[in-house]
């Protein structure tokens, strides 16, 4: 009778000892007093909020996504299914989850430019905070503070957090998933693992298949480092995948279960199938030819960017200054972080963290390098991995520098600072954008390396701490300058492709000219305002104010007002909706009277029908001066022509 309680106490004692061992494996000692840690974190978050939120009323509203967001804010059908116009006749070419926060903000505050950009600022600041908490639990306060600083100062992150593009929401949700996974590995509890699956599923709603890229990394790290037997770990990994799959597929199944007549036609598809939208149009077509992949509209890859691909993509002169400043430090940290933990027990959390963030980085680089083209801002999703690896590596190298396990370990910290500082000089050398800072970087790096390389009683702990601070400044000063430059519209890139600094076609177009303020919500140009006034004056009960050739023609009108438009052909103009017969029926039933065609998009059977059955409207009827001739308005009333 007395043996059983003692056995239970022994088991509980062992579990407590195991948890203590797991915590101590990550805790390198408190390098920052608790009060200063809190103050420092608040300071970093304040800087992030200021940097991301500066000039919010002139934020870069993506013309296509901005149009959809305004429509989704005014219609429940458009909100749920991602309708491009308020009537929800055709959808956007993405899942709508990434735009739900933006549409909710516009619904709450009104159609203001700052309202559509506000969620992105909040997402950016939250990502910094969540990354700090995640890295702190894994590698301690010093690593967490550096990771938060590094993420805040990443140029592509700063510029993207003032744009209406869903990549920042994707990044936030994946950082939450990584934090939940590390908690599950550390604690052995099931709930954090299921939370990881939930966050991955929500990230799928934000940007589809890109959210699933990290599932193999999450599963591998859990199988390697989680407590319990092999069967228990495999079973729980299956639950992780099942949770992610269930949450990911929820919107797809909802659309599939809804009658086509009760929802928008799905853009980018020839079969109106949500799985085609995700796995064909936004999946297979990204990695080669897309001649009707899984029912996707053929030829849509031609409408996408074809640059920034190949194995040198991450370090080219456009992408490199956006994201790659800490690449040497991060790669060195990933390699040595795993190497130095060789021989540790299977559940070593320090090694698990380096594998997690290193896998995050490596897998994204591999996918971006083999796709058929990437916007530079796609790389924002790897910023947390670079920041976490750099923070964890810096803390590990600092610990080894003070109490090395081997003699050569002491030299790694100054070598990492020298290598990363030199790499920053190389990245900036192509443009010499922050040339006045180059001597500052050299001076800080030399002072840091020289002091850290000294040995003897004359180099005390305080001197080494100041040397570390100088090294941190040396590796962060140039990316910070690029990030801050994005406050100036000249260095913020285009609304469709945000870029910090003097790179990209948008800067080349503006160089030497005064940058124009991005058009936001409810701010139509004089031409669009005149067109809207004319159409409203001649409207006589039609459902649609106008039929347009592709979203390109409809975007400025949808951002300016909330009138239903019939967008023929969707984003590319190639989606086979409406057909010529459907358009003829709508015209015959007085559902739409006017159509506007453009020479900037290819002809389709529907546009051919307009040219054959409708009469041109002179631009002088609704404009004070002629345009460049790329747009033509047609009157399609039955008595016309």
Image: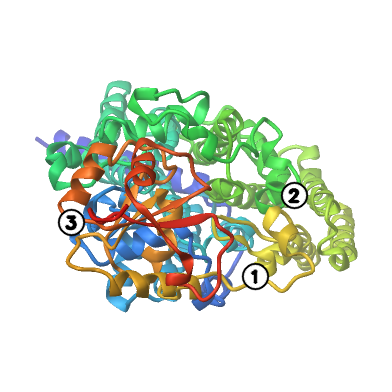
Give the mark, 2 or 3, whose residue is nearer the N terminus: 2
- In the displayed structure, does residue 512 sit left or right of residue 89? right
Q: Identify which residue is drawn at 64% across, 52% down.
A: 395
Q: Identify which residue is drawn at 43% across, 51% down.
A: 597
Q: Nearer the viewer, mark 2 or mark 1?
A: 1
Observer-nearest residue: 470 or 435?
435
Give the mark, 1 or 3, whose residue is nearer the N terminus: 1
Q: Dot 2: few (<14), some (14–19), or many (≥20) neighbours within 10 Å?
A: many
Give the mark, 2 or 1, whose residue is nearer the N terminus: 2
Q: Secondary structure at mark 2?
A: helix
- In the displayed structure, does residue 253 sit left or right of residue 184? left
Report if residue 255 is visible in the image: yes
Q: Dot 1: few (<14), some (14–19), or many (≥20) neighbours within 10 Å?
A: many
Report if residue 222 is visible in the image: no
Q: Secondary structure at mark 3?
A: loop
Image location of residue 141, percent across then percent down: 55, 60
Q: Secondary structure at mark 1?
A: helix
Q: Dot 3: few (<14), some (14–19), or many (≥20) neighbours within 10 Å?
A: some
- Compared to residue 587, the image places residue 294 above or below, namely above
Q: Are marks 1 and 3 in contact (CB under 8 Å)?
A: no
Name which quarter of the figure residue 562 lies in.
bottom left
Image location of residue 401, percent across then percent down: 75, 49
Q: Are marks 2 and 3 in contact (CB under 8 Å)?
A: no
Number of the label disc, if any, that sits on residue 401: 2
Image location of residue 21, percent across then percent down: 45, 43
Residue under numbered circle 1: 489
Observer-nearest residue: 201 or 38?
201
Q: Nearer the viewer, mark 1 or mark 3?
A: 3
Residue under numbered circle 3: 590
Name which quarter of the figure residue 633 lies in.
bottom left
């Amino acid at each position: 009778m007395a043996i059983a309680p003692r056995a239970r106490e022994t088991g509980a004692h062992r579990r407590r000892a195991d948890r203590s061992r797991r915590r101590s494996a990550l805790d390198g000692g408190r390098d920052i007093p608790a009060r200063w840690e809190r103050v420092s974190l608040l300071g970093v978050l304040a800087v992030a909020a200021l940097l991301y939120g500066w000039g919010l009323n002139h934020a870069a509203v993506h013309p296509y996504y901005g149009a959809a967001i305004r429509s989704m804010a005014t219609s429940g059908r458009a909100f749920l299914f991602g309708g491009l116009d308020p009537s929800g006749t055709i959808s956007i070419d993405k899942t709508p989850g990434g735009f739900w926060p933006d549409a909710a903000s516009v619904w709450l505050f009104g159609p203001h430019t700052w309202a559509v950009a506000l969620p992105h600022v909040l997402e950016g600041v939250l990502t910094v905070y969540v990354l700090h908490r995640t890295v702190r639990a894994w590698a301690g306060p010093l690593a967490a503070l550096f990771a938060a600083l590094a993420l805040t100062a990443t140029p592509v992150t700063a510029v993207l957090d003032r744009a209406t593009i869903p990549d920042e929401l994707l990044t936030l949700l994946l950082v939450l998933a990584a934090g939940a996974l590390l908690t599950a590995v550390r604690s052995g509890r099931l709930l954090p693992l299921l939370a990881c699956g939930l966050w991955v599923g929500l990230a799928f709603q934000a940007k589809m298949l890109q959210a699933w890229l990290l599932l193999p990394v999450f599963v591998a790290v859990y199988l390697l480092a989680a407590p319990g037997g092999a069967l228990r770990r495999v079973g729980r990994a299956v639950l992780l995948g099942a949770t992610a799959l269930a949450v990911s597929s929820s919107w797809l199944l909802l659309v599939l279960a809804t009658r086509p007549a009760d929802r928008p036609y799905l853009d980018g598809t020839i079969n109106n199938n949500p799985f085609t939208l995700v796995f064909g149009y936004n999946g297979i077509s990204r990695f080669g030819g897309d001649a009707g992949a899984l029912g996707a509209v053929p030829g849509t890859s031609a409408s996408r960017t074809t640059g920034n691909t190949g194995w040198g993509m991450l370090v080219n002169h456009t992408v490199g200054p956006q994201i790659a400043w800490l690449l040497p430090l991060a790669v060195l940290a990933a390699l040595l972080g795993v190497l130095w933990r060789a021989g540790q027990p299977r559940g070593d959390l320090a090694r698990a963290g380096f594998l997690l963030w290193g896998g995050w980085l490596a897998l994204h680089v591999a996918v971006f390098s083999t796709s058929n083209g990437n916007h530079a801002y796609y790389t924002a999703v790897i910023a947390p991995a670079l920041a976490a690896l750099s923070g964890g590596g810096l803390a590990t190298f600092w610990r080894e520098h003070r109490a090395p396990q081997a003699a050569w370990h002491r030299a790694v910290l100054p070598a990492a600072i020298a290598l990363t500082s030199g790499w920053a000089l190389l990245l900036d050398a192509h443009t010499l954008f922050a040339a006045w800072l180059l001597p500052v970087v050299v001076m800080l790096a030399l002072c840091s390396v020289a002091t850290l390389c000294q040995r003897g009683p004359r180099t005390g702990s305080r001197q080494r701490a100041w040397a570390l601070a100088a090294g941190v400044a040396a590796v962060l000063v140039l990316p910070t300058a690029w990030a801050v430059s994005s406050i100036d519209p000249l260095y913020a890139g285009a609304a469709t492709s945000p870029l910090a600094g003097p790179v990209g076609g948008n800067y080349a177009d503006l160089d030497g000219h005064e940058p124009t303020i991005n058009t936001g919500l409810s701010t139509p140009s004089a031409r669009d305002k005149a067109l809207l006034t004319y159409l409203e004056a001649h409207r006589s009960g039609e459902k649609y104010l106008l039929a347009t050739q592709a979203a390109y023609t409809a975007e400025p009108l949808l951002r300016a007002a909330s009138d239903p438009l019939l967008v023929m052909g969707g984003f590319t103009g190639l989606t086979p909706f409406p057909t010529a017969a459907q358009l003829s029926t709508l015209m015959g039933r007085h559902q739409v009277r006017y159509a506007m065609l453009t020479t900037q998009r290819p002809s389709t059977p529907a546009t051919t029908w307009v040219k054959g059955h409708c009469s041109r409207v002179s631009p002088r009827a609704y404009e004070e001066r002629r345009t460049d001739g790329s747009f033509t308005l047609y009157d399609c009333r039955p008595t016309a022509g």
